[in-house]
Amino acid sequence: MRGRQRPRALLCDCDGTLIRDVPYNGDATRVEALPGVGEALARARGRGLKVGIVSNQRGLALGAFSAEQLAHVQRRVAELLGPFDLVLHCPHDADEGCSCRKPQPGMILEAARRLGVGPQECAVIGDTAGDVDAAAAAGARAVLVPNAATDPREVREAAEVRATFGAAVDAVLEWT
């Protein structure tokens, strides 16, 4: 899109985008970075982008894991792929009506505020329509990186789709 600002921040979904999705994972030993993600994040950081994680963590609401277990998982993600300027998560279930759970824009807006950038200066990369919709509702731009669990309809409806996280980061770095 012409007339948009160059991104100053890259906000990434976590499970299925940065790391292999292990449903309701509270075990840091099961965290595995997806291929090429570390290198792509390094390119983004090298170009001066602030990098953050914005992740729904429904497992907290369901009691599938504790906040302490999630903190261990997040530390492992940072060990493999960090450093991150920001890590935010929504601990709510889908029916709780919070403003932070994607596809609501709250987490994107809060990340932008904490990083000192406008939401229009944020790029969001995720693997679901919820990630893309949250970005759009916040005024950010998004790239969908589908995986085996992504609904094909979401792929057809997304404005920008790339096959890999690395290709998504490269696209973001080309935006003006």
Image (cartoon, helix red, strand yellow):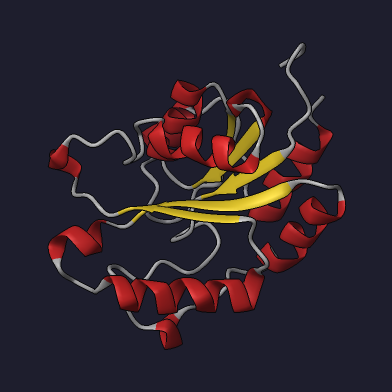
- Residue 144: percent from left, percent from top: 54, 40
Query: On the picture, is 120 further left or further right than 39?
Result: left
Query: Can the viewer see residue 25 in this picture?
Result: no
Write down the quadrant of residue 24 in the picture.
Answer: bottom left
Write down the quadrant of residue 170 in the picture.
Answer: top right
Q: Which residue is found at the position 19% from the left and 43% from the top?
A: 94
- Residue 101: percent from left, percent from top: 31, 41
Q: Residue furthest right?
A: 47
Q: Which residue is found at the position 33% from the left and 78% from the top?
A: 69
Q: Which residue is found at the position 44% from the left and 61% from the top?
A: 15
Q: Nearer the viewer, residue 11 or 154?
A: 11
Q: Residue furthest top?
A: 3
Query: On the picture, is 84 further left or further right than 21?
Result: right
Q: Nearer the viewer, residue 96 or 29?
A: 96
How many labels were placed on the picture? 0
Residue 171, above or below 164: above
Locate the N terminus and report the quarter of the image it occupies.
Answer: top right
- Residue 100: percent from left, percent from top: 34, 39
Locate the C terminus and report the quarter of the image it occupies.
Answer: top right
Residue 102, above or below 52: above
Residue 20, above or below 113: below
Q: Nearer the viewer, residue 104 or 113?
A: 113
